[in-house]
Amino acid sequence: MRVELRFTRGPRAGQSLALDDNQTVIIGRGVETTFRIDDPSISRRHCQITNSPQGVLIADLGSSNGTYVNAQRIGTWVQLGPHDEVILGNNQVQIYVPSASQLPHLRCSSCHKEISPADEAAGRVRQDTNGQVVCADCLKKFDFDPHLIEGYLIEKKLGSGAFGSVFKATQVATGRVVALKTTRTSRRSTTRARTAGLTSSPWSTSTARS
């Protein structure tokens, strides 16, 4: 059964994260986590929560400030129940098991269209480290999650070649429209983003910054 993690205190307060059967989330402030919280009071990889056949389980991942369940610090796997409170640094999470009629409708963070239960059940959606959900159509459009490169919102693909692709994007902090060039090395799947300010001239794939 799906469970919901409701964030009631901290930078993510007011947000929630749904976990389906056999789904796992790693919470922390590092970019490699499943659900990222930009908060220095938690570790890069703080805790792991799994919706398993044995129930909802949580384990601390060696965090500095610890993981607390109902005011008790935990280490290895502990089972969570409905309405249990989890404390991660300055963040508080409540466990909620909604009925089917209470489950919120997912919407794509890019096109804002409602995601059908069929697409969700088939896994034709993606959730990034900011908790944003992207629909199947937008995944095809962007070739990858528009929020994947931290600090930028990718709007559309402008072109691609043998060594990478160029995308139109907006820098979140400044609102500046830029071109992002991603390149992949032959030895490993590493993506590097390079930016250049957009102008009326043809697109450039140079590394020069405006």
Image (cartoon, rainbow, N blue to C red):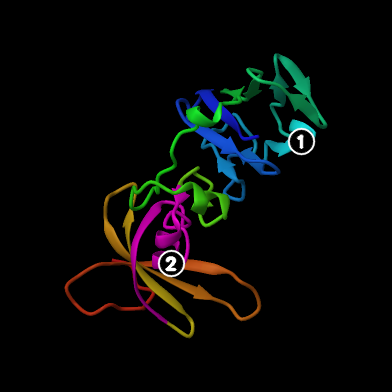
Q: Nearer the viewer, residue 63 or 71?
A: 71
Snapshot quadrant of residue 22 = top right
From where the camera sits, is residue 59 visible?
Answer: yes
Q: Give the percent coordinates (x, y) of residue 107.
A: 40, 44
Instruction: Tell me which residue sits at (38%, 54%) in the image.
Output: 152
Q: Residue furthest left?
A: 200
Q: What is the secondary structure assignment of the residue under circle 2?
A: helix
Q: What is the secondary structure assignment of the residue under circle 1?
A: loop
From where the camera sits, is residue 44 visible?
Answer: no
Instruction: Tell me which residue sits at (43%, 48%) in the image.
Output: 115
Q: Nearer the viewer, residue 57 or 177?
A: 57
Left or right placement of residue 182 versus residue 45 in this view: left
Q: Nearer the viewer, residue 172 or 145?
A: 145
Q: Amino acid at mark 1?
A: Gly
> Would you place residue 75 above or below residue 27 in this image?
above
Left or right placement of residue 112 versus residue 93 in this view: left
Q: Give the percent coordinates (x, y) of residue 30.
A: 59, 45
Q: On the image, numbered disc 1 is attached to which residue?
A: 62
Few, some or many C-alpha atoms within 10 Å of disc 1 (few <14, some 14-19, many ≥20)?
some
> What separation in Å lies between label 1 and label 2 (alpha carbons)?
38 Å
Q: Is 139 part of what is drawn in magenta?
A: yes
Instruction: Tell me which residue sits at (76%, 20%) in the image.
Output: 73
Q: Is 146 part of what is drawn in magenta?
A: yes
Few, some or many C-alpha atoms within 10 Å of disc 2 (few <14, some 14-19, many ≥20)?
few
Q: Which residues are magenta?
A: 133-160
Q: Earlier in the sequence, mark 1 or mark 2?
A: 1
Q: Give the percent coordinates (x, y) of residue 97.
A: 61, 26
Q: Residue furthest bottom?
A: 162
Q: On the image, numbered disc 2 is attached to which residue?
A: 140
